[in-house]
Amino acid sequence: MSGLGPILLIYGAWGLGFIILLLLGYFIYDKRYKNNGSTAPNKPSNGFVSTSEVFIDPKDGFTYRVYYNPRSGDREYIRES
């Protein structure tokens, strides 16, 4: 059984690394214009101006307009009706 310990250690390290990558992917996943289950805002925050950029999200099929804050460089994605 002395040869089994290093093998379990190696596969355990790979398994742990895989689990860590899955968790990082879940928490860092791109959620820029998702609303965390709340109702979608229908107007941008203060200081944001409308841009001509509009796109259709391939995941949900809704149209989003991009708003830009010139002071901070942040962008907001607001679903259009």
Image (cartoon, rainbow, N blue to C red):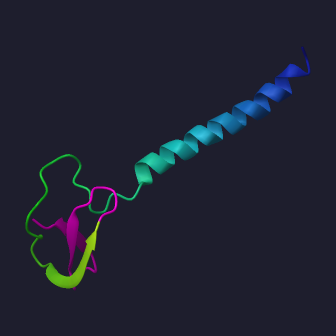
* Residue 80 is covered by the magenta coloring: yes
Give the magenta range.
57-81
Tell me residue 28's x, y (percent).
43, 54
- Judged left or right of residue 75, residue 1 is right
Query: Where is residue 76, by image quadrant?
Result: bottom left
- Judged left or right of residue 25, residue 7 is right
| Picture residue at 12% right of the left edge, 79% below the top | 47
Res 77 seen here:
no
Mark count:
0
Q: Is residue 81 above or below residue 25?
A: below
Q: Is residue 46 above or below residue 13?
A: below
| Picture residue at 14% right of the left edge, 56% below the top | 40
* Residue 41 is covered by the magenta coloring: no
| Picture residue at 62% right of the left edge, 41% below the top | 18
Q: Quadrant of the C terminus?
A: bottom left
Q: Is residue 68 above or below residue 9?
A: below
Tell me residue 68's x, y (percent).
22, 80
Q: Is residue 61 above or below residue 36?
A: below
Query: Where is residue 60, by image quadrant?
Result: bottom left
| Picture residue at 21% right of the left edge, 67% below the top | 63
Res 74 seen here:
yes
Q: Nearer the viewer, residue 43 or 70?
A: 43
Q: Quadrant of the N terminus?
A: top right
Tell me residue 21's x, y (percent).
56, 46
Q: Nearer the viewer, residue 9 or 58?
A: 58
- Judged left or right of residue 7, residue 75 is left
Residue furthest top in the image:
1
- Judged left or right of residue 17, residue 2 is right
